[in-house]
Image (cartoon, rainbow, N blue to C red):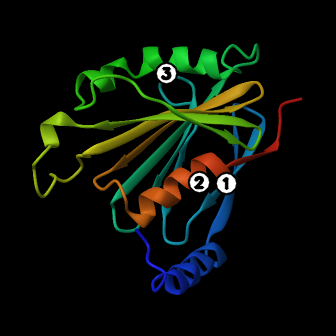
């Protein structure tokens, strides 16, 4: 919770971060371009046509506390263009995560986003509850979801060990508000 006393400092921090961020324009799925604002100091890696033939972008914050991966998936027939269709897809795709989670049922947060909408679910890894510190390269919290665009969608995974860090909040905002399509498929 931010207090009124902390608000001016937080506002300056947000303005500083925005001024020092850079946008990476990536071409995925052969011809579509997306702008991904990479926060200053974060590392990004693009993997073209990985093992599933889908393009993936991975972002890591400088402290190593956040890992955000986007996988771009074509959907020319718009099979997952509605919130109901996307919920069904996520139910199928996230079942394995739910099996290893503290949470017992899928719960989705759905928000409108530029060019479509975003839906995600939150999981706590039950084998890491009460473990401190969390072992290197393991993650206590997983936020997984879908961001839609006409004719494509992005499956994303946000890994963190804190639920309320500024870096986690920034990563989720990047998915829901800042990621935009620059040029669509023709």
Count residues near mark 2 (Cα–Cα under 10 Å), then give few for <14, some for 14-19, many for 20+.
some
Q: Earlier in the sequence, mark 3 or mark 1?
A: 3
Q: Residue at x 16, y 53 (%)?
A: 134
Q: Residue at x 64, y 23 (%)?
A: 83
Query: Mark 2 and mark 1 in contact (Cβ < 8 Å)?
Result: yes
- Disc 3/disc 2 C-alpha distance (Å): 20 Å
Residue 3 rendering spot, x and y as whole percentages: 44, 77
Label 3, secondary structure: give it.
Answer: helix
In this rendering, position of residue 130 left or right of residue 46: left
Residue 93 rendering spot, x and y as whole percentages: 44, 19
Q: Is residue 93 visible?
A: yes
Q: Residue at x 50, y 86 (%)?
A: 9
Residue tagged 1: 178
Q: Nearer the viewer, residue 103 or 33?
A: 103
Q: Is residue 164 above or below residue 2?
A: above
Q: Is residue 95 above or below residue 1?
A: above
Question: Where residue 174 is drawn, which disc sits there?
Answer: 2
In this rendering, position of residue 165 left or right of residue 145: left
The image quarter containing residue 84 is top right
Q: Which image quarter holds the N terminus?
A: bottom left
Count residues near mark 1 (Cα–Cα under 10 Å), then give few for <14, some for 14-19, many for 20+.
some
- Disc 3/disc 1 C-alpha distance (Å): 22 Å
Count residues near mark 3 (Cα–Cα under 10 Å), then give few for <14, some for 14-19, many for 20+.
many
Q: Residue at x 39, y 24 (%)?
A: 106
Question: Where residue 90 is drawn, which disc sits there?
Answer: 3
Label 2, secondary structure: give it.
Answer: helix
Residue 171 rendering spot, x and y as whole percentages: 50, 55
In this rendering, position of residue 68 left or right of residue 24: left
């Amino acid at each position: 919770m931010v207090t009124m006393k902390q608000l001016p400092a937080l506002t300056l921090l947000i303005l500083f971060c925005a001024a020092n961020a850079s946008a990476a324009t990536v071409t995925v799925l052969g011809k579509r371009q997306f702008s991904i604002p990479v926060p200053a100091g974060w590392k990004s890696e693009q993997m073209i046509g990985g093992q599933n033939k889908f393009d993936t972008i991975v972002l890591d914050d400088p402290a190593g506390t956040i890992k955000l991966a986007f996988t771009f998936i074509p959907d020319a027939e718009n099979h997952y263009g509605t919130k109901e269709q996307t919920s069904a897809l996520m139910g199928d795709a996230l079942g394995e995560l739910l099996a290893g989670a503290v949470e017992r049922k899928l719960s989705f947060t759905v928000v409108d986003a530029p060019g479509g909408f975003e839906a995600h679910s939150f999981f706590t890894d039950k084998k890491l509850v009460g473990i401190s510190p969390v072992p290197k390269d393991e993650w206590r919290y997983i936020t997984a979801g879908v961001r839609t665009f006409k004719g494509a969608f992005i499956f994303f995974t946000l890994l963190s060990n804190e639920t309320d860090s500024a870096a986690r909040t920034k990563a989720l905002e990047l998915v829901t508000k800042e990621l935009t399509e620059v040029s669509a498929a023709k």
